[in-house]
Amino acid sequence: MSDLDDVIDVNAKSAGVDGKKAEQLKTVGWVSYLLHLIVAVAAVLPGANVGGMVAMNNSQAIGQ
């Protein structure tokens, strides 16, 4: 048996974190991932000038 055949099982408890806290952290990680994905997709979509729309709305709000 070589070292490549060894399996190492890592549990959240071994790192000093209980299961509920680990699940909460995993959920926060997924939410963060999805929000970053939305921002990244919006950044590369052609014609999605989100920054320009915000600037235009701000200038209209102050009467320019």
Image (cartoon, rainbow, N blue to C red):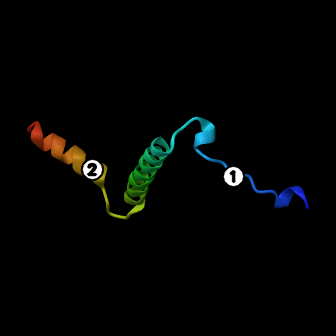
Q: Residue 20's spot in the image, x, y percent?
A: 45, 44
Specify the amino acid type for callout 2: Gly
Residue ranking furthest to the left: 63
Q: Which numbered disc covers residue 27? A: none
Q: Is residue 11 left or right of residue 18?
A: right
Report the residue marked by disc 2.
52
From the top left corner, tell me how far across and down residue 41 is, in percent.
41, 60
Q: Helix or strand or loop: what does disc 1 sit on?
A: loop
Residue at 83%, 61% (x, y): give it.
5
Quarter in which the N terminus is drawn: bottom right
| Residue toward you, 6 or 56 | 6
Q: Quadrant of residue 3?
A: bottom right
Write down the residue under mark 1.
Answer: 9
Position of the C terminus by quadrant:
top left
**Residue 6 falls in which quadrant of the image?**
bottom right
Q: Residue at x 74, y 52 (%)?
A: 8
